[in-house]
Image (cartoon, helix red, strand yellow):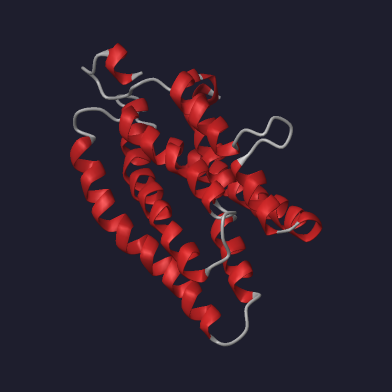
Amino acid sequence: MELLSDRKILFFTVAVVLFHFANAAMLPLVGQELAQGKGTSDTVYMSACIIVAQLVMIPVSNLAGRFANAARKPIFLLGFAVLPIRGVLYTLSDNPYFLVSVQILDGIGAGIFGVLSVLMVADLTKGTGRFNVTQGMLNTAIGVGAGLSNVLAGFVVKSAGYNVGFLILAAMPAAGYAYAVVALGVFWFCVPETKTGVNRKASR
């Protein structure tokens, strides 16, 4: 209850859940779209999507860790910002090579998230002795967001097609703005810089 009453942790959790709600179903949808083609190359393309993201994620994680020593929030904002761009790009073409290349953005987002989320939780729980329980709560929330993402995407794709599915993940249905943009907005405006000693104005 103390964790839930901490506004910094609460807003950070909401932003992260929205990130995964927008992100989790994108790659499975790409795999399904590739599987509509003919021949055995579909599995090759799907494997390429995963490999490309992983290859990009490794150097991005390294760079994110280095730059995070100065400030956390600007770097994490970049990870959030690539998500709506990725969702929109998926709708522009069903060419397998194009879809695989868009996965570069997935690697950027995942690389940043993997490093910065742990660092920010450590910052938010510094001196409290609650790092592990906060990380566990966050991971549980992420799992819920990712699960709901796949459920929603499945219903949307079945009734309206892949492009609408990608846009729904990238966009608020009623207003036309991205779920990913909502996550970006929540993080931008509600989550403060957690690195101590960073100028508040510079972190906005």
On the image, the x and y values in percent for residue 65 come to 23, 42
Q: Is residue 99 above or below residue 9?
A: below
Q: Residue furthest bottom?
A: 39
Q: Is residue 5 above or below residue 117?
A: above
Q: Residue at x 71, y 50 (%)?
A: 152
Instruction: Depth check: give the residue in front, 156 or 36.
Output: 36
Q: Is residue 8 visible?
A: no
Residue 52, quarter of the rendered image: bottom left
Instruction: Depth check: give the residue in front, 128 or 30.
Output: 30
- On screen, residue 192 versus residue 173, left or right, reads left
On the image, the x and y values in percent for residue 155 come to 77, 55
Q: Is residue 140 above or below residue 94?
A: above
Instruction: Depth check: give the residue in front, 58 or 14.
Output: 58
- On screen, residue 144 versus residue 74, left or right, reads right
On the image, the x and y values in percent for residue 134 come to 44, 35
The quadrant of the image that shows the C terminus is top left
On the image, the x and y values in percent for residue 167 come to 64, 46
The quadrant of the image that shows the N terminus is top right
